[in-house]
Image (cartoon, helix red, strand yellow):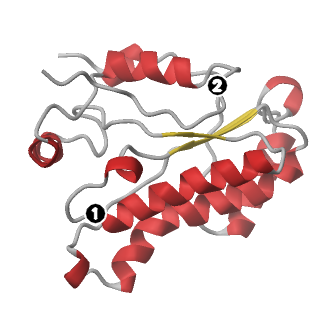
Amino acid sequence: SESFASTVRPPRAMALGCDVSDASEVKAALQASVSTGAGAGGRVRGLLHAAGTSSDRTIRTMSAANVSKVLAPKVFAAWSLRASVSTLGSVESFVLVSSVSAALGTVGAANYALANAALDALSCCSRANAAVASSLQPLPVFGVGMGDEATIQRLAADMEGPFSLTATQYVAWLRAALAPACRWMLLPVIALS
């Protein structure tokens, strides 16, 4: 069995705790990262936003609270990060990890598809205003995060075929997606037999 952690060689990074859906906390955390010497030359070179949660319900039973629960870590947080990037000076990358669900949707997860489509739109809007931004739409990674076995089986049934990546496939795709020349939304493709 392949371990996600064993396939990733992370860049030098600093983790700071904050509520990323609260703009003032995000700004303070980013300023703290600069003042404590994060990154090369005491500056932040890039941001990777990969938060998310689910609150699956059918449209008929979905409440505003179900929608807010999913929007907060994805959309509100990305908006706060985007607004705070200007306090960092020039960053080389601002990467939003969306989901393939923004393009394909899944049964019972309209709020999750909405949140991810909003990340894609924020990335496009940022680029249109000459800001660095990328939005990635990965498939779930089997056995990691939201890629638990039950979810993968449900998605495979919804899509009538395999619907996940291995850790090795994901890392290879992520490396290609984060290449300096790549500034588009990327959707990994799986050949279905």
* Residue 85 image point, x, y percent: 80, 50
Report x, y in % for residue 108. Answer: 21, 65
SS for callout 1? loop
Q: Residues within 10 Å of mark 1 (few under 14, many from 20)?
A: many
* Classed neighbour count for the residue bearing mark 2: other residues with Cα under 10 Å, few (<14), some (14–19), many (≥20): few
- Classify residue 95 as left or right of residue 57: right
* Disc 1 target residue: 109
* Residue shown at the point (17%, 43%) measured from the top left: 159
Residue holding disc 2:
182
Does residue 46 sit above or below 17 in this rendering? Answer: above
**Residue situated in front as seen by the camera: 17 or 191:** 191
The kind of residue on which mark 1 rests is: Ala
Q: Amino acid at mark 2?
A: Cys
Residue at 66 percent across and 32 percent down: it is 183
Is label 2 in a helix, a strand or a loop?
loop
Q: Is residue 158 visible?
A: yes
Identify the image quadrant of residue 105: bottom left
Residue plotted at (46% across, 55% down) = 116
